[in-house]
Image (spheres, helix red, strand yellow):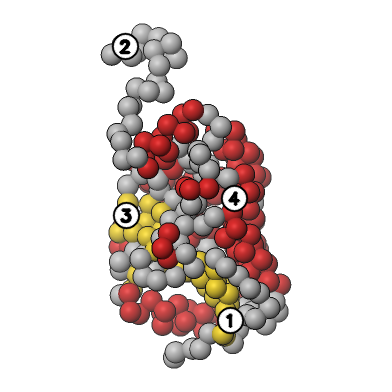
């Protein structure tokens, strides 16, 4: 069944589209020219939309996706800061993750294209993920002088296992939707033209269930990983300090200037005596 989604006229968002249909809300990151990378302003709007959906008793399920067919979300917009991302972005990222995980209703990620870096983390923390066959997922942090050691890494070990999580972060490879399905990173993969209908069907199946039961189940699922909430707050503070280093700037510049990073640049002999020789 095809549904008509209507914009919520109570909000005048610039970077996202917030719309509703009976029983469900949909949040669309609307920056397709930037592959739906988010800025600090995008994160502020996501917090507002997620908070409204979380507290709206007429909403029983939330869909999170990206505009267009190329990208779900490719993480933080690198143009906001000299190294890493802005302090405002780091302030609001944990709030977005917390709202997705802690609202008393399921959040479904409709992964319609690239889900890279912070975008991959965002789909990962959703309750359920349905991906288009054309979707690509992966991490890029260590290539660009960044990381997410909270839900991005800690929770990932509980989703795909420790060995696979380390591979994803250490190697920064990109995985197909089918590979993501096989490792448990998404729930289902469908052809691109079936993604919206499939997500609608999952929404309808959830909405037909007892909201009280769903609410309690979600709280139980979250309780198992409650330790990661405090870890994320701590590691984001550490991440902000890391962004102030020359190392973070070096790797970001190397990535965006398409120059090969020198693997010895930040592995100095004086740090590892007897291991490396000077060039």
Whole-angstrom CA distance, mark 2 to mark 1, is 61 Å
Between the C-alphas of marks 4 and 2, the distance is: 39 Å
Please state, as top left, top right, bottom left or bottom right, where the N terminus lies in the image. bottom left
Position of the C terminus, as image quadrant, is top left
Task: Give the left or right position of residue 20, taking residue 166 as reference.
Answer: right
Between disc 3 and disc 4, whose residue precedes? 4
Q: Quadrant of residue 189?
A: bottom left
Residue, x 35% and y 66% (percent of image)? Answer: 70
Q: Which residue is mark 3?
A: 175
Q: Which residue is mark 1?
A: 7
Q: Earlier in the sequence, mark 4 or mark 1?
A: 1
Q: Are marks 2 and 3 in contact (CB under 8 Å)?
A: no
Say what secondary structure mark 2 lies in.
loop
Residue 48 in sight from this viewpoint: yes
> Toward which corner of the image does residue 274 lie, by quadrant?
top left
Q: Are marks 1 and 3 in contact (CB under 8 Å)?
A: no
Residue appearing at x 59%, y 87% in the figure:
22
Residue on which the image places disc 4: 89
Residue for point 39% across, 12% down:
269
Badge 2: few (under 14), some or many (20 or more) residues near its Cα, within 10 Å? Answer: few
- The residue wearing badge 2 is 278
């Amino acid at each position: 069944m095809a549904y008509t989604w209507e914009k919520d006229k109570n909000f005048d968002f610039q970077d996202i589209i917030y719309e509703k249909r009976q029983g469900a809300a949909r949040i669309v990151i609307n920056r397709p020219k930037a592959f739906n990378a988010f800025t600090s302003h995008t994160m502020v709007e996501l917090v507002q939309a997620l908070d409204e959906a979380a507290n709206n008793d007429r909403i029983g399920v939330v869909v999170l996706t990206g505009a267009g067919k190329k990208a779900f979300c490719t993480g933080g917009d690198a143009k906001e800061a000299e190294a890493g991302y802005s302090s405002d972005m780091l302030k609001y990222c944990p709030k977005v993750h917390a709202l997705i995980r802690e609202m008393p209703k399921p959040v479904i990620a409709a992964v319609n294209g690239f889900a890279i870096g912070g975008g991959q983390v965002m789909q990962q923390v959703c309750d359920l993920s349905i991906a288009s066959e054309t979707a690509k997922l992966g991490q890029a942090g260590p290539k660009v002088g960044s990381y997410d050691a909270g839900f991005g890494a800690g929770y990932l070990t509980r989703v795909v296992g420790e060995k696979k999580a380390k591979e994803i972060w250490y190697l920064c490879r990109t995985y197909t939707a089918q590979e993501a399905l096989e490792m448990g990173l998404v729930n289902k993969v469908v052809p691109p033209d079936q993604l919206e209908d499939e997500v609608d069907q999952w929404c309808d199946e959830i909405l037909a269930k007892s909201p009280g039961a769903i609410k309690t189940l979600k709280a139980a699922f979250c309780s198992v990983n409650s330790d990661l909430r405090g870890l994320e707050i701590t590691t984001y503070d550490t991440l902000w300090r890391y962004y102030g280093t020359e190392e973070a700037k070096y790797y970001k510049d190397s990535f965006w200037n398409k120059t090969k990073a020198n693997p010895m640049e930040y592995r100095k002999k004086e740090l590892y005596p007897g291991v490396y020789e000077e060039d």
